[in-house]
Image: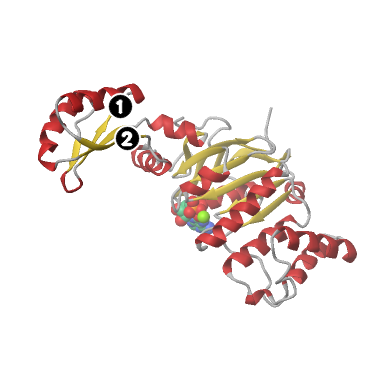
Amino acid sequence: MTGAIHAEGLVKTFGEVRAVDGLDLDVPEGSVLGLLGPNGAGKTTTVRLLTTLLRPNAGIATVAGHDVVRQPDRVRLSIGLTGQFTAVDERLTGRENLCMIGELYGMRSRAARQRAAELLEQFDLVAAADRKSSTYSGGMRRRLDLAGALVVRPTVMFMDEPTVGLDPTSRLILWNAIEHLVETGMTLLLTTQYLEEADRLAQQIAVVDHGRIIARGTPQQLKAQSGHQRVEVVIARTEQIEHAVTLLAPFGTRRPEADRPRSRISVPVDGGVRLLLEIAAALDSAGVEITDIELRRPTLDEVFLALTHEAPHPRGTEDVAVPAGASSEKE
Ligand SMILES: Nc1ncnc2c1ncn2[C@@H]1O[C@H](COP(=O)(O)OP(=O)(O)O)[C@@H](O)[C@H]1O
Ligand SMILES: [Mg+2]
């Protein structure tokens, strides 16, 4: 059973650099995968391999059921691609840009105009449709670019850092547009450095670093997996902080940390709400007054930082050929 996007043991080297280093992916039809990773992790290279713009050194990949190496034309007819660098022609209006793409793909001009009108509506560009796109804001251009990728109704969409560099409002508008697309049943692979973006848009996240997947799961699973939850207590009277630290120590999996100026103590724990209640009771019966207590679960940011710091980075340079499915990733 293979999904709309499937890759096994994908490798791409540039000289000594193993940009993609034995990557496995499986994206079920109609779902969204967020490929999350820092700069230089290999996200763009992965997208370029899957969209037939680069040939892999090893491994296999299929998109919409077609092999990216043996059937690149078929793959190209099934996909849409947008990235941080838009393919918008500035000399043309928004409408002309979309019509041109339709005609390039062999649509009759009437059909192309009809499709352009639909997309302008869908991406909230009707008012600006007949203005030169050189007058568009960054967010509008990004939306026009996305609309352009949808002219031929692809079944699989790739978005390489779609909102990088956008202001918060434009980012929200684009997120909404992407969510609407996903509701139509499209499969989407989206790369991002923004955890918030992956958390909001993707059902599955694969964290990539040094060309390898170092973790994958739903946003919730990734948060749970890192397991760094802690109890944070704010003490009413700063002079009680030492006493409170002593009382808290037995509850923690590691030593509590005190932030004296804020009268706040943080203690890593391995337990849920019951433990929180026990801690509150222990402080209360010892006469330590608290103004706030909370159980903090890790944010995706913390998970991401923990993963990208702790991951081993085997960087062999000799064995370029990795057999399909033989990648040694850490789940
Ligand atoms: N055309 C290229 N030539 C040489 N090195 C490249 C090329 N493209 C990417 N790289 C290198 O491959 C690694 C991964 O790059 P890239 O896929 O662009 O990462 P990301 O998109 O996650 O920032 C980086 O070390 C980058 O410098
Ligand atoms: Mg990139």
Residue 189 versus residue 94: which sits nearer the camera? Answer: 94
Residue 65 in picture, x, y percent from top left? 73, 38
Residue 21 seen? yes
Q: Is residue 260 above or below residue 82?
A: above
Q: Position of residue 317 (x, y in %)?
A: 43, 43
* Residue under the image location 82 percent in, 60 percent down: 115
Figure disc tally:
2
Which amino acid type is shown beneath numbered disc 2?
Answer: Glu
Q: Quadrant of residue 57?
A: top right
- Residue 328 is at least partly visible in this image: no
The crowding category of the residue bearing disc 2, from other C-alpha atoms within 10 Å (few below 14, some 14 to 19, many at least 20), is some
Q: Which mark is residue 294?
A: 2
Percent x, y of residue 325: 56, 30
Give, as a three-letter code, the residue at label 1: Leu
Identify the image quadrant of residue 288. Answer: top left
The residue sitting at 52% across, 62% down in the picture is 166
Q: Is residue 88 above or below residue 201?
A: below
- Element class at badge 1: helix
In front of the other: 198 or 69:
198
On screen, residue 70 versus residue 322, left or right, reads: right
On whether ligand 1 comes within 8 Å of the CB at mark 2, the answer is: no
Q: Residue at x 44, y 45 (%)?
A: 210
Q: Earlier in the sequence, mark 2 or mark 1?
A: 1
On screen, residue 263 versus residue 121, left or right, reads left
Residue at mark 1: 276
Gap in angstroms between the C-alphas marked 2 and 1: 7 Å
Helix, strand or loop at disc 2?
strand
Look at the numbered discs 2 and 1 and tell me whether their residues touch, using CB distance below 8 Å.
yes
Q: Nearer the viewer, residue 190 or 244?
A: 244
In-image side of 33 versus 240 (left or right): right
Q: Residues within 10 Å of mark 1 (few under 14, many from 20)?
A: many
